[in-house]
Amino acid sequence: MPRTSSTVDPVAGWIRDARRITVLTGAGISTDSGIPDFRGPSGVWTRDPKAERLATLDTYLNDPDVRREAWAKRLAHEAWTAKPNAGHEALVALERAGKLRALVTQNVDGLHQRAGSSDELVIEIHGTIWFAECMACWDRHPMAAILDRVRAGQSDPRCERCGGIIKSATISFGQALKEDVIQAAIEAASDCDLFLAVGTSLTVHPAAGLCDVAVRGGARLVIVNAQETPYDDLADAVVNEPIGEMLPQLVGV
């Protein structure tokens, strides 16, 4: 299988010739914006395996100390000040060229939209950190409003409507994904002619399984990621180069 820089010319040609490209992005596309990934060598969970409990639904719901720690970390989350990087901007260029079928993202940082990607094309399968919602009545508010309450001294803010536990509008471990969102992602993977997986370890399902859906539908599969993935052997090309440098080259911007 062709890998690394030797794949640039053929992949760039495939992208140039494609008419319907579906992109799947993971944490690796946002590291150049200062948002650490989770499972990489310097990832959040690699450096501190205990941090994963903050993203586990049952633990979050049943342990007030975990919720207080989670809210303290949300106050300092890198997403509030992060700016889109060249990788995000390359995907905006792909959309403006009329080639983007959909942009499916595992990220919750909102950087694709801030870069200029259209809301109607971005499918956030793991939700967004920019909103918070009650786990009892599903009342939903901008995250900024809830963080203001935390800064004012509410270390574990509760829903003002029903008193329920509030969590970021992200999908935690043990939490069901939204069926309509997943269905939209499956449809986008099934009817594209090129599926581009960028900055994702392809170890989390059902997101990783979109590669299978795309290949079964006849699409070429291209993986751009710093580390090897379980889907490398299925891919038509694997590029193990820095995303911020390589993606603009592949897209031709």
Image (cartoon, rainbow, N blue to C red):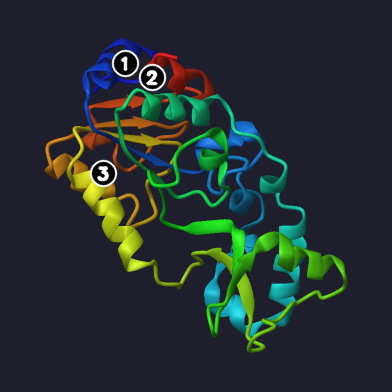
Residue wearing tag 2: 251
**First-in-chain label (3 vs 2):** 3
Seen from this angle, which residue lies furthest right? 152
Residue wearing tag 3: 211
Residue 172: x and y, percent? 51, 67
Cα distance between the residues tagged 1 and 2:
6 Å
Q: Quadrant of residue 55?
A: bottom right
Out of 187 and 53, give the one closest to the viewer: 187
Label 2 is placed on what type of residue? Val
Seen from this angle, which residue lies furthest bottom? 162
Residue 216: x and y, percent? 13, 44
**First-in-chain label (1 vs 2):** 1
Identify the residue at image location x=45%, y=34%: 227
Is 59 rendered above or below residue 117? Answer: below
Residue wearing tag 1: 12
Out of 152 and 176, give the one closest to the viewer: 152
**First-in-chain label (1 vs 3):** 1
Label 3 is placed on what type of residue? Cys
Cα distance between the residues tagged 1 and 3:
19 Å
Q: Residues within 10 Å of mark 1 (few under 14, many from 20)?
A: some
Identify the residue at image location x=54%, y=74%: 57
Q: Is residue 165 visible?
A: yes
In the shown orientation, is residue 172 left or right of residue 202?
A: right
Q: Residues within 10 Å of mark 3 (few under 14, many from 20)?
A: many
